[in-house]
Amino acid sequence: MEKIMVFLEAFKYGLSINGTLEISEWKYRVVFNNMIIISRSSSLFFVLTLVLILLCSCSRNNKSLIADFEKEPMEGWKSTEDLKLNSYSIEILPPEVIGFKGFGVLNTGHDQPEKIGTLTSPEFIISKKYINFLITGNNHYNAEKDCNVRIVIDGKVVKYAPPTRYPLVEWGTMDVSEFLGKSARFEVFDKSDKHFIIIDQIYQSDELALGAEELSFKVDKKYLLFPVTKGGAKYRFRLDKEGDLTEQFVVEMGNGEPDYWSFKDLSNFQGKEIKLKTYCPISVNGLDKIHLSDVVPGENQFYKEKERPQFHFTSKTGFLNDPNGLVYNDGVWHLMYQHNPYGVIGSLKHWGHAVSTDLVHWTEKPSSLVPDDLGSNHSGGAVVDFNNSAGFQTGDVQTLVAFWTSAGHFSTPSSHFRQCLSYSINNGETWKKFEGNPIIDFIAGRNRDPNVIWHEKAETWVMSLFIDNNEYAIFNSNNLKDWTLTDRIIMPASECPDMFQLNLDGNQENTKWIFWGGNGNYVVGDFDGKKFNVEGEAQRTHFGDYYAAMTYSNAPDNRVVQTGWLNKWPFQNTNFKMQMSIPNEITLRISPNGNPILYSYPVKELESLRSESFLHNKDMLLTQKPFVPNFKAELMDLNVLAEVKKDGVLKMKVRGEEIVYNRNDNTISYKKEKIKLLTNTDIQEFRVLVDRASIEIFCNGGEKALFFPTAISKDNKTVEFISEGTKSKLKKLEIYSLNSSWASK
């Protein structure tokens, strides 16, 4: 047995990083480079011979070890601040942290995260395509700023990767092929007093390090099903699909019966081979439950759940956020959006895709974009390439071209944020990623969210792009592939830019341009296709939990239709999470204070959902005794025209949710939001839309719009009005119940 152990030490230090030999009662289990071989009756001589063959194979692969932290001291490494040059025994790691190899790891302080500093390796020559490592730690969103591992060349950080989802241990990778032959250092950078990194087995290789298990399928059914355990281990998967790009995603999984099933729609891969791989060095809980099926368990309840919004878009399952790629073409409104179809955590982002012919009734399609080795698919826009600028069109159908950010921090291998494109030659049925991606390389920070328009007068394509902090950039292109920087804009916003042109007060001879930021701030100005000339200060029309809104490209009849993300969710145990706002029609008008401002109002198509109504068109004096119309509804569209004089307060309780207008302050209040209105007269007009999980309030034709996700009482289906102080009047009241837009599902 001693000879075997000596041999295994040579195995570990010399040639392999992922190899073990386990012996128990003449049963041998060899694990080598993710291959599992079990011999139940072979002789020990046979097993050792097999290991030697595998060792020779490893030698041919020529892996190059940078550090495995098995020996003290960490020779040649340098430390700063609180961090010390010593390895950390895996024996004193928390018991749930499993998967590291050998006996030692580098640990910046899972038990003392307030410790900060850096640990830097000796110089080495980059000789392989990848640098692989086993890692765990707090998966901090801003990993590039204060908690990550890095490759440093000539004092400059050229690559970095965040720690994974603690306590899960996974293989991480950085692609360093562009730096072959250069001298580099590996740096563990922990400047956070809240986060930490545990890392082991850092080595160079021409092969991507993957987990110990793999599943293969010949696709003969519609779906690949994954068992989801909420709060379970967040396993990262890699799905290789024959004839298509690799997809990366994360699923929460555990032992026992799943909470629900997530699914991958394989309609476009029938008859093809797929391989599912992990990044976990040990067995994955629940892997044996993954299977192909023509049905999704529980799908007969999709859109029938008691918490499901009834006229706001939600995905069948999973997490959604920013609207993306909003485009109209050939009678179809395409709503794409940030989506994790595999769970209700905001993990690696796909682009979900839904279509509608009326902005009200939606049909969900397979994902239009999936995360690949370039990164998670973050936000962006889409256009109709009406003159075939990019040259992708092959028939009579005009090409749709989408632009997005490959967020490389969140994929494996890790990289910077870069801008990419994809296209569809069949009106969005299928999408293909451009082989020349990225089309714009890394600039700074988390440069992201490319949005593209056609500028008619300048006859050029224009891209707006968020750079960093409060800075945006504008680019021009004549082919949608090659882009030239033409301007930079500073405004009090970040992320998700949009640009659109509007007629001022409907006058086609007087147009203005809007530059929009992710938080709802916007500026008005002139734009010649290259430079944006800002006029006045940033303004805001939309309030509440309304974020990352985008307008539809190529909308008919010169309409400007906008949809935003309602970025809070009021329920705890749903299999879907988050919702879109209703679509809003955006116009530009001279406000009562004399400035051009955006007005936002529900699109007219929503009126098609109206059914029963209560209509009152005569003046009614209100008092402190509640006026309760004889009308009840769950889904509600309320229109109020009221006269509220000085010292008067109007309270509207819509299904128990109190909305207050104060005449002296000229403010509308709901929950913690209090907004000053521009129309400062005794006559005020309000429209309120109530769904199961939201309230949206539009004031005076849309001069201010408030959006609030909230759980509405199931029992209270009434409306009541109360006047305090000077008595108010209802001059007009319309209440409509609304049908569900999912009724046919």
Image (spheres, rainbow, N blue to C red):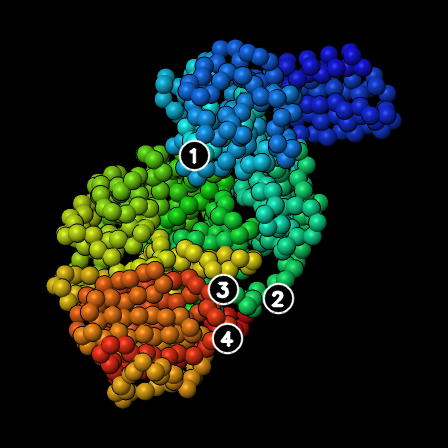
Circle 1 or circle 3, nearest the eye: 1
> How many marks overall?
4
Looking at the image, which residue is at 61% across and 32% down?
Answer: 94
Disc 4 residue crowd, few under 14, some 14–19, many 20+, Cα 10 Å = few
Three-letter code, disc 4: Asp
- Name the quarter where the C terminus is drawn: bottom right
Circles 1, 3 touching at the beta carbon (< 8 Å): no
Tell whether 436 sits left or right of 345: left
Q: CA distance from mark 3 to mark 2?
A: 15 Å
What's the CA distance linking mark 2 and mark 1? 41 Å
Q: Could you tell me residue 57's position as x and y percent?
A: 67, 19
Classify 683 as above or below 282: below
Mark 3 vs mark 4: in front: 4
Foreground mark, 3 or 2, reads: 2
Q: Earlier in the sequence, mark 1 or mark 3?
A: 1
User: Can residue 478 be seen by looking at this rendering?
Assistant: no
Give the position of the N terminus as an image quadrant.
top right
Residue picked out by circle 4: 715
Please give the residue where the numbered disc 2 appears in the rendered image.
Answer: 300
Question: Is label 2 or label 1 in front?
Answer: 1
- What type is the residue that disc 2 sits on? Asn
Residue 542 in the figure: left or right of residue 425: left
Marked residue nearer the N-terminal end (3 or 4): 3
Q: What is the distance, in whole Å, between disc 3 and disc 4 at their CAs?
A: 30 Å
User: What's the distance in space between the residues labelled 2 and 4, CA to CA?
Assistant: 25 Å
Q: Residue at x 23, y 46 (%)?
A: 491
Viewer can see residue 136: yes
Q: Any mark on residue 363, and which?
A: 3
Amino acid type at circle 1 is Ala
Instruction: Residue 398 in the image: state x and y as whole percent.
Output: 38, 56
Q: Secondary structure at mark 2?
A: helix
**Tag nearer the camera, 1 or 4:** 4
